[in-house]
Image: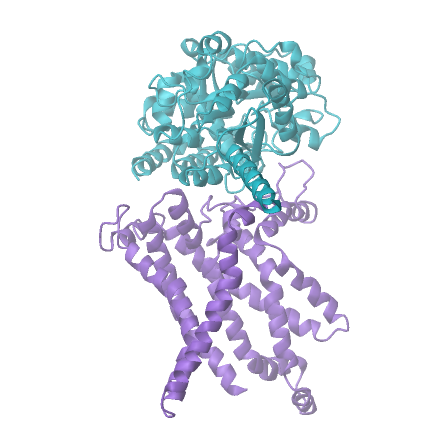
Chain colours: A purple, B cyan
Amino acid sequence: MDFNVLLTDLPTLVVVIIGVPLVLAAYIVGGEYLVRRLPDKARPAVRPWIWVAPALVLVAGFLVAPAIATLIQSTEDRHGVFIGFQNFATQLAGFPTGGAWIAIRNNLFWLIFYTLFVLAFGLLLAVLFDRVPYEKVVKSLIFMPMAISSVALVVIWKFMYAYQPPGQPQTGTLNFIFNTVFHQDPRTWIQDETPLLGLFPLNDMALIGTAVWGIVGFSLVILSAALKGIPGDLLEAARVDGAGEITIFRRVIFPLMMPTVVVVGTTLVIFALKAFDVVYAMTNGNYHTDVLANRMYQLLYNSNDFGGASAVAVILLLTVIPVLIFNLRQFRAVEARR
Amino acid sequence: MHQLWLKRSLLLSLAAIVTAVACGTSSTPSAGSVNVMATWTGAEQASFMAVMKPFTDQTGITINYEASRDQDALLTTRVAAGNPPDLAAAPSPSLLTTFAKSGKVKALNTIVDMTALQAQYSPGWITLGEPLADGKLYQVYSWVSLKGLIWYDPKNFQAKGYNVPNSWDALLNLQQTIKSSGTTPWCIGLESGAASGWPGSDWVKEIVLSQSGPTVYDAWWQGKQKWSSPEIKLAWTTWGQILGSNDSNVYGGAKNMSATNFGDAGTPMFQNPPKCYMHNQASFITSFFQSANASLQPGTDFNFFGLPDITSQYAGAHVVAGDAWSMFNDTPQAEKMMKYLTTADAQAIWVKRGGKISPNSQVPLADYPDALSKSTAQILVATKIAKYDAGDQMPSDMRNAYWSAVLQFAQNQNNLNSILANLDAIQAKAYTS
């Protein structure tokens, strides 16, 4: 670690350590001072704004302004000349394989399968582990991949998916099982585009599987917490009334967990739309596994095509907004119920 | 009386301080120093310091060495801030060439001993240091490395009576002989995470240079030669000949090629019986061989031959890499050091410590610690046409598309026309921004 950098930039360091808290303190004291000068009636109206203003400024400066800049940039060419919706036209040209369509298709797969698998596994595991004494241990184990960075996750799964030609000892876990248990030829999971059920490319599913393994602990702990929140006497009453365990799950547990499931689900949908790291590290979008976020990154940093990258970002933003709104509404509904 | 003495001593000490400060800031009391930036750390840094020790001992000039793995970013910032090192050595010359274009580095023609350089360096290495082709030398090479080495297991070759091919036709004949004996001749692995495809791109660029020569090669990476032009297309189909129809010359075929990491690709060569007989990779691959199988010995278990010349007109053309030096500040100390770095004496120090090859023909072959580096040195010193990695000099989206094209070509060679058309489309855009 080169600490010289810190020393050469001493003035900046001093400003950051002393200046920033000083300015904030001055702002608060000064704000309060001004508010006190106001007539009694006006104070409650003004005071909250004084306190909220720094956050508003930060959000405006670091979120709203760049978003607007991206919107503007998406209508410009490389030289900053306005070209209308041409960037969008390029991205959406050549359906179904040209432009961004492969990425859009894959994001759709991610949206469906990533969300579905993570919710299903999370729910299943939460309900099952609720009934065993070693619940905490297993939950910690399943939660553990959450602590692994995505690139490390990919390295681990590359070993899982490793391929050796037929006849060689299979070093990849999946191909080993495939080979010794099912007596099938090994497959190149990450490169093989063979569609499963005639529709979903194998390598896309392999990538999604990797991401699911990494995140399933997240949905498990949240859903498990929701499950614990269901009053025991309610389940007791259902049992007394003669309901079987499956009926109890369908009619009592699941409806009560529904709001949580929806919140987790919508969060996962946003994760799926943002999917980048696993794709970038595993295939970099090769073999038709590209997703919108990776495409945006490539356009931005490899092609220096700021307009095209912004257009993809805007497409991504537009698809996320409805989910965001839905998510916020659900969140409020859950809060209101408490 | 007492006060006067105090005044005098105060004045005296003040004068002393002023002189000291003046000396410290303006003139240099000792022989001075050179600020150097390079990427070598750890053992490599120790080797570089060993190279510089005789220089410091002799001249008294001290070296302020700064190492960074993120050299491109650091150097760009430092140059932009007007605070560049005096000398910098970069493993990829693209950035140094950018600085040459913007006039940030000095021409070296009057600084190094050109007569000695021309006597000791093959012309390929000197032209490589004149990236602007304006007759000015902006980069000199102290140590270099070679791409396009064909690795083989000498024991396997001997057992089957195969000879190291000395011409391109002999190579094609050899692969046919191996194939008809029931084994795939080649091991190729294209997987490399986000950079997948580059090992195949090495094949193509080596073929372009050896087949169509330096003019086509340069025009190609500069974006002036279309991918669909006959020369570049020929290089791809020539690589296709190596791969065989449906990649039948490669161990495991297309599937294994795309799924195998470049580092693991060569190891099936050492199985018994061998799964392949040849593997094309730069010299770093030996560490992968040995980490997969620690008992493998260089020379006896693995050796290499240079990719044979394809067109006799361009014999001795090689894709190379090297540590290029550029000068940012023209100080007498930096000049001395630059001169020193081009000498055989300086370069031999690192050569003896292992891991580096010198482009200087005066470095005795006996100085190389092992047989492999010795034969690499023989090829490099005799290199007539030295060219840098074409892919590394392309704009990054061109380069990435090139890598992806390799993957697509390996999957299905029949798609070559559409693959090249797609590369043309990217070429048309990539160079304009």
Q: Is residue A71 left or right of residue B182?
A: left
- Horizontal arrangement in the rendering, residue A76 relative to residue A154 (left or right): left
> Please, is residue B235 above or below residue A304 in the view?
above
Q: Quadrant of residue B32?
A: top right
- Can residue A197 be seen in this snapshot? no
Q: Tell me where residue A141 appears, x and y as whole percent.
A: 70, 62
At 71% from the left edge and 17% from the top edge, which residue is drawn? B300
Q: Between residues B307 and B351, which one lies in front from this camera angle?
A: B351
* Outermost right residue: A133
Q: Is residue A55 visible?
A: yes
Q: Quadrant of the N terminus of chain A?
A: top right
How many discs appear?
0
- Which residue lies at the image location 41% right of the left edge and 38% below the top edge? B82
Which residue occupies the foreground of this view, A107 or B34? Answer: B34
**Left or right: where A249 falls relative to B25:** right
When the figure is inspected, residue B325 is found, relative to residue A111, above or below; the finding is above
Q: Is residue B302 above or below residue A110?
A: above
Q: Residue A45 versus residue B33: which sits nearer the camera?
A: B33
Q: Which residue sits at x=68%, y=13%?
A: B158
Q: Position of residue A321 (x, y in %)?
A: 38, 68
Check the image and report above or below for A103 versus A185: below
- Where is residue A105? Give x, y as percent: 41, 55
Picture quadrant where residue B305 is located: top right
Question: What x and y, as percent, mark residue B142?
Answer: 53, 20
Tell me what residue is drawn at x 55 percent, y 34 percent. B257
Quadrant for the C terminus of chain A in the image: bottom right
